[in-house]
Amino acid sequence: MKSAPRKHDRRKKRPRPLAAAVKWAAAVLIVGLLGYGVSQMSAVAYTDSDIRVVDFSMLTPAKKRSALQAANQARCSCGCGMTLAQCVSTDSTCPVREDNVQTIRTMVRNAGQP
């Protein structure tokens, strides 16, 4: 007489190759999207909400991003080592702060040009 198979004798089903490939593809896609998002935000440390003295509202999102990247890359001329955006956002005592504000406004105007 044959005995019924025991639970521990049963073999586990192997995952289907297609299901495993879909899971891996989804994981890679998620990691890629996260990496892309981080890379897109990394160049803009100070945003338009930080630089409230300059009006960015007339720009499209792409042009606003371009102007913000420029303001976050250009350096303050007083020698402090800050960027224009950082200086305008954080240092109200900078001797050239008003010049920096005007420079950022010019960047915004230039970004809005066709």
Image: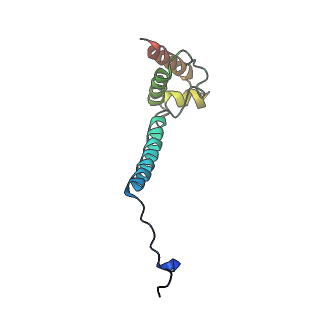
Image coordinates for residue 15, horizontal then vertical, percent: 42, 61
- Image quadrant in which you'd find residue 86: top right
Considering depth in this image, is 73 or 10 the residue closer to the camera? 10
Considering depth in this image, is 110 or 58 the residue closer to the camera? 58
Image coordinates for residue 101, horizontal then vertical, percent: 54, 20
Q: Relative to 4, is 13 above or below?
A: above
Q: Residue furthest bottom?
A: 1
Q: Residue at x 48, y 13 (%)?
A: 109
Image coordinates for residue 108, horizontal then vertical, percent: 49, 17
Quadrant the C terminus occupies: top left
Q: Residue at x 56, y 24 (%)?
A: 95
Image coordinates for residue 80, horizontal then vertical, percent: 50, 33
Considering depth in this image, is 75 or 23 the residue closer to the camera? 23
Q: Is residue 109 visible?
A: yes
Q: Relative to 59, is 79 above or below?
A: below
Q: Residue furthest top?
A: 114
Q: Is residue 78 visible?
A: no
Q: Relative to 15, is 68 above or below?
A: above
